Image: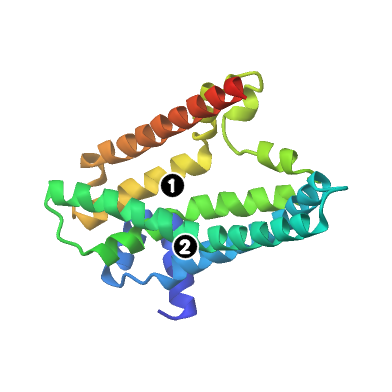
């Protein structure tokens, strides 16, 4: 797929999803969606890195310089691996979920095609990451970066850990993402989107459940600490 057709596919997936996903299914390339995701993740990592390293230096101020430098190196390498690996890991998990749903509904597409569909369906989350990276430029503290969110959570600053985690999992980019997942799945199984709306609801419910569990664990650890 050349550059022009790649841009056209991204445009169609974002603005005319069913048509865009039909094109993805006909030629399920992985380099475009996952390449874009890795580039944005790498850019976000580079924005966050100086603040993270500054936090490490502050933590070790007055301590052993070897420990501080080693921790900075480990943090840099770990962050780089995560930035480049998370798009693929999330894609594999999403593709597995879609493939299970496809088998239930009689779909016949292979795993690579599912992986490509998920990669393009995650583009709204990539866009969200880019927006957050830009917002992070004006933030000078790691805590401030962690509070950045394009979701419902900033509307309820006094919410508890579980509620805050659930609200953080629901936002415009997430809704857009799950909508694309549903439309991509409809294209995969050759069904009308109205007949597979349950998939988007199920995926959103799964994310909210996992977010609630994570929030409960975080709240428990805070109490224990």
Against 142, is 46 above or below?
below
* Residue receiving disc 1: 177
Q: Residues within 10 Å of mark 1 (few under 14, many from 20)?
A: many
Q: Secondary structure at mark 1?
A: helix
Q: Residues within 10 Å of mark 2 (few under 14, many from 20)?
A: few
The reply, left or right, for residue 102 in relation to residue 79 is left
Label placed on residue 11: 2
Whether residue 191 is visible:
no
Name which quarter of the figure residue 71 lies in. Answer: bottom right
Q: State the separation of the CA atoms marked 2 and 1.
A: 15 Å
* Residue sticking out furthest to the left: 106
Q: Residue at x 69, y 61 (%)?
A: 46
Whether residue 116 is visible:
yes
Closer to us: 1 or 51: 51
Q: How many marks?
A: 2
The reply, left or right, for residue 13 in relation to residue 3 is left
Closer to us: 188 or 20: 188
Q: Position of residue 55 (x, y in %)?
A: 78, 47
Q: Earlier in the sequence, mark 2 or mark 1?
A: 2
Mark toward the viewer: 2 or 1: 1
Closer to us: 13 or 156: 156
Against 7, is 180 above or below?
above
Q: Position of residue 175 (x, y in %)?
A: 45, 39
Q: Secondary structure at mark 2?
A: helix
Q: Residue at x 73, y 38 (%)?
A: 143
Name which quarter of the figure residue 59 lies in. Answer: top right
The reply, left or right, for residue 161 in relation to residue 137 is left
* Residue sticking out furthest to the right: 62
Q: Quadrant of the N terminus?
A: bottom left
Name which quarter of the figure residue 92 lies in. Answer: bottom left
């Amino acid at each position: 797929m050349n550059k022009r057709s790649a841009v056209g596919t991204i445009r169609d997936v974002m603005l005319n999803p069913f048509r865009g996903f039909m094109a993805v299914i006909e030629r399920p390339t992985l380099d475009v969606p996952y390449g874009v995701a890795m580039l944005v993740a790498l850019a976000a990592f580079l924005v966050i890195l100086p603040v993270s390293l500054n936090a490490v230096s502050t933590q070790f101020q007055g301590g052993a310089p070897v420990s501080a430098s080693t921790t900075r190196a480990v943090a840099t390498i770990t962050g780089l691996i995560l930035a480049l690996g998370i798009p693929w890991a999330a894609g594999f998990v999403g593709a597995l979920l879609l493939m299970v749903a496809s088998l239930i509904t009689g779909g016949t597409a292979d795993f690579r095609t599912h992986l490509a569909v998920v990669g393009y369906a995650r583009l709204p989350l990539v866009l969200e990451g880019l927006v957050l990276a830009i917002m992070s430029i004006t933030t000078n503290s790691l805590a401030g970066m962690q509070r950045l969110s394009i979701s419902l959570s900033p509307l309820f600053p006094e919410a508890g850990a579980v509620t805050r985690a659930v609200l953080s999992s629901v936002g415009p980019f997430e809704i857009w993402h799950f909508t694309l997942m549903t439309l991509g799945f409809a294209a995969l199984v050759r069904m009308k989107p109205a007949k597979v709306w349950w998939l988007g609801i199920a995926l959103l419910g799964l994310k909210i459940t996992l977010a609630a569990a994570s929030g409960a664990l975080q709240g428990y650890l805070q109490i224990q600490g």
